Amino acid sequence: MTSHFADRLFEAVKTKKTCLTVGLDPVYSRLPSAIRNHLQMNDEFDVDAAVDAIFDFCTQTMRIVAPMVPAIKMNIAFFEKYLWEGIEAYYALISEADDLGLEVIGDVKRGDVGHTAEFYASAHLENPELTGLEDTLVPDAITVNGYSGVDGIEPFAETATKQGKGVFVLVRTSNPSAADIQDFSDANGIKMYEKMADIVNQVADKKDRIGAKGYSNIGMVVGGTSPDVTSALRTRYKKIWFLIPGYGSQGASAADCIRFCKTDGTGALVNASRSIIYAYEKPKYKDQYGDDWKRCIEQAVIDAKVDLANAMQTKL
Amino acid sequence: MTSHFADRLFEAVKTKKTCLTVGLDPVYSRLPSAIRNHLQMNDEFDVDAAVDAIFDFCTQTMRIVAPMVPAIKMNIAFFEKYLWEGIEAYYALISEADDLGLEVIGDVKRGDVGHTAEFYASAHLENPELTGLEDTLVPDAITVNGYSGVDGIEPFAETATKQGKGVFVLVRTSNPSAADIQDFSDANGIKMYEKMADIVNQVADKKDRIGAKGYSNIGMVVGGTSPDVTSALRTRYKKIWFLIPGYGSQGASAADCIRFCKTDGTGALVNASRSIIYAYEKPKYKDQYGDDWKRCIEQAVIDAKVDLANAMQTKL
């Protein structure tokens, strides 16, 4: 993989005609009963059965969404719950996603400094050149926590750039208490998240990091749930891809999220996780498609794409 | 494990008569040649050989240091480099450490919000009740990144408290660029890290979290390299255990670090990683003990303990 991550993302968004990404946050107890009742996967408290069920669910979900969205986001916490067995499944799913032509964002929120950050970066952004792990693929991009400052971001950025990969640094998260830390303001009214965005932009806006389409491979994570505090970021940082969590279950509207897209529809990925992968729990879909959980997911993706496209039309 | 983490730590520090902890940051290329030349472990690019070498080194190092220090800190980045194979070794080493009577701090710097944080907390602070992982032990405490605010800290604190475990939240890190983010000041001169410390203290200072010795199981990570900016924290937060990285290779002196200890020697863990586990690389030890790498590590621990004890005497 030697192409530029930001260019691949640009092409993928153009091809799929949407900025929607699907987040895989698999929780055993919420998997479709067809999977949970399967003879080899019906024991939540057996690590092999549970991981097989999650792997099966994620693989099938990716096959449904792959023709419709540019990327998936995999939150590693839901795999770490099963320790090394879960991590093996996480990496195996990346290969499946790659086969399906999906860009994969590993939502790992790693962060450390110097030497240690290099080891994290290697694990998550560099395909291992190790006998025994030969065919393992890492994600196309990961999320990074930048609380340590530029020392903690640069090692990830450097590895990502060398490997044709990307990094999204947490700038403004979508949870209620985020404001306590991230909206902490200096004497001039500059907020912590704005300072963080400035630091990330310094890392992002380097010649070798800007792709042919004008975007950097180093992006920012900004929650869609706080559009009032973050809407200036799009105009301020023209070379940045934004990863926007919070659409769907977390309560951000399509209009809230779409403001991070440029008029050509690129520049932001709007992620929905639970509202799509558990669509079969909702009466809206369940009443129509019954036990056909895959059809429910498919329709939820279609509906989300339409919702975002309509918001985009209104904005233009 | 139902006892209180902060009480266990208190006893361990009193018993071992030191606040020194040893950090395991194993890097294959720096392992003793006796290990790297071993027939089954001499191939850095074979995952089994590399992980076996690291496991062997860490086990032997723990056996040397266990009689002398209260705790070890394992940085998971150095294990994640070997993906799931490394993670399996990480958890296996926790069992080894437990057998040796060491408290184990998993330096994982995880952080996320709500639901996702609960999954991380479960993976890292709750012994798995899963067939196939029955005998696996998790660390006694982990490090957590609190950039998301209290929503991102509380789920870890809750699981830790239920499980008799602990959490150390990053407040002020020991790297040069930490100041850009963590010393960001508001109109009253309050710095970001002070705000973070306040939030952590709110989580820590709850009735069910304070042990018999007056300390909370929720602590703070504060780098020893910035004593000027952080010295007020010890007096301000009397119920907090501080985890102090930066002693040794990162340049913090014993006096810098010891100021986080109370006069009875408790209240802080001062961590040294590379300066101890790679002591055999230093002429000071190599010239005296030759190829006896274990003796070099042992002496480095003794010397660090004396250095910290002397600084403590001077302070009193």
Image: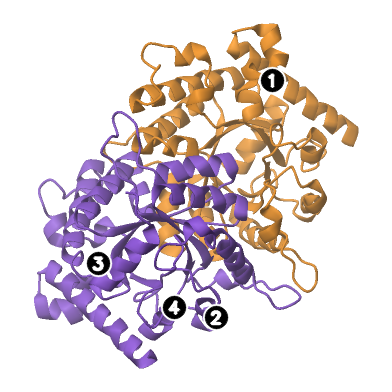
Chain colours: A orange, B purple
Q: Is residue A316 visible?
A: no
Dot 4: chain letter: B
Quarter of the image for the C terminus of chain B: give it.
bottom left
Q: Can residue B174 be seen in this view?
A: yes
Q: Earlier in the sequence, mark 2 or mark 4?
A: 2
Give the secondary structure at mark 3. Answer: helix
Q: How far apart are marks 4 and 1 (CA)?
A: 54 Å
Q: Which amino acid does label 2 sit on?
A: Ala
Observer-nearest of B94 and A136: B94
Q: How far apart are marks 1 and 2 (CA)?
A: 53 Å
Neighbor class of circle 3 (other Cα within 10 Å; few <14, some 14-19, many 20+) is many
Neighbor class of circle 1 (other Cα within 10 Å; few <14, some 14-19, many 20+) is many
Neighbor class of circle 4 (other Cα within 10 Å; few <14, some 14-19, many 20+) is many
| Circle 3 residue | B277
Q: Quadrant of residue A285?
A: top right
Q: Which of marks 3 and 2 is in front?
A: 2
- Residue under disc 1 on the same chain as residue under disc 2: no
Measuring 55% from the left and 69% from the top, which residue is drawn there?
Answer: B178
The percent coordinates of residue A77 (x first, y second) are: 48, 40
**Relative side of B74 to B67, left or right:** right
| Circle 1 residue | A300
| Circle 4 residue | B260
Observer-nearest of B215 and A40: B215
Q: Which amino acid does label 1 sit on?
A: Ala
**Relative side of B225 to B32, left or right:** right
Give the secondary structure at mark 2. Answer: helix
Q: Which of marks 4 and 1 is in front?
A: 4
Measuring 30% from the left and 59% from the top, which residue is drawn there?
Answer: B103
| Circle 2 residue | B232
Measuring 39% from the left and 36% from the top, which residue is drawn there?
Answer: A87
